Image (cartoon, helix red, strand yellow):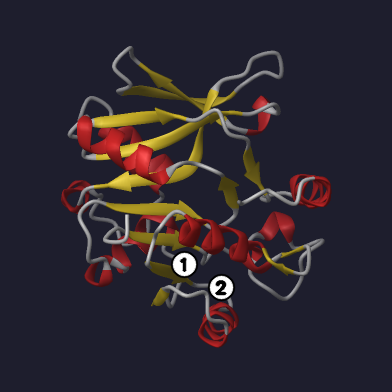
Amino acid sequence: MKDCDCVILCGGLGARLQSVVKDVPKVMAEVNGAPFLDLIVGHLKGQGIERVVLCTGYKANFVENYYRDHDFGITIDFSRENEPLGTGGALRNAREIISSDPFFVLNGDSFISVDLQAFLDFHREKKALASVLVSQVNQAKDFGSVQLDQSGKITGFCEKMKDDVQPLVNAGIYCFDQAVFSCMPEDEKFSLETDFFPALEGKEFYGYRSDQEFIDIGTPQRYESMKEDFKKDKNIGH
């Protein structure tokens, strides 16, 4: 694990969250007195990760200055997008400073306490080009679902589901081989989720199931719910 880079996508504006989180990027939204991103970085260190690359964008200086001033005991480097590139464009923008093969990619506004070593082992055993962590959520209508075959290969994606089903959803953590860059769209700006992943269907593209709780702070309601959960369970992230 110490040789695996982790790229965290944290350049988004977070427009839906701005009514409750103002003047800072959404990854810096306060949870129990510290930025939400601290929860992710601390979890990665606990998993044995030694190098993180933060893909910054909106209010990049705010994020970069904070992580230069705070020592987490791991190497933290930065890849800045000077204009919004989408999740896919931001990742490709960081290509030159991603050293490991394979490497992890995480969304900076969600958290799930996954065993990254087990995820990496799964990715290697499947000889996958790309692997997506999938989990179940209670509020199914807010998320699209991921379909897997019996081998774990991803066969399709569906739009947001009804409340009476519990689909597998993209939990915002990926394991990629470096070869994935050659499969990306030529567009400078693109989304991993909507522009890239559907094009990987039928290739060596797998879903790794987790039974851990998926936490997302993308809306004011989910952000407030997460803060309440954290107050009740101080072990979140450990």
Residue 64, given in percent of the width and then of the height, sits at 52, 81
Residue 84, given in percent of the width and then of the height, sits at 47, 67
- On the rendered structure, is 74 left or right of 214? left
Where does the N terminus fall, quadrant-wise?
A: bottom left
How many neighbours does mark 1 have within 10 angstroms: few (below 14), some (14-19), or many (20 or more)? some
Compared to residue 152, the image places residue 44 above or below, namely below
Q: How many numbered badges does the structure rendering display?
A: 2
- On the rendered structure, is 87 left or right of 222? left
Tell me the quarter of the picture where residue 55 sits. Answer: bottom left
Residue at 19% x, 46% y is: 183
Residue 59, given in percent of the width and then of the height, sits at 58, 78
Q: Residue tagged by mark 2?
A: 58
Residue at 22% x, 60% y is: 100
Identify which amino acid the numbered label 1 is placed on: Pro
Compared to residue 182, the image places residue 157 above or below, namely above
How many neighbours does mark 2 have within 10 angstroms: few (below 14), some (14-19), or many (20 or more)? many
Q: Residue tagged by mark 1?
A: 84
Identify which amino acid the numbered label 2 is placed on: Tyr
- Tag nearer the camera, 1 or 2: 2
Q: Is mark 2 on a helix, strand or loop?
A: loop
The residue closer to the viewer here, 11 or 186, is 11
Q: Is mark 1 on a helix, strand or loop?
A: loop
The residue closer to the viewer here, 165 or 18, is 165
Q: Earlier in the sequence, mark 1 or mark 2?
A: 2
Residue at 26% x, 34% y is: 200
Q: Do the residues labelled 1 and 2 touch (CB within 8 Å)?
A: yes
Residue 180: tell me if it is visible.
Answer: yes
- On the rendered structure, is 123 left or right of 212? left
Label 1 – label 2 distance at C-alpha: 8 Å
Compared to residue 88, the image places residue 199 above or below, namely above
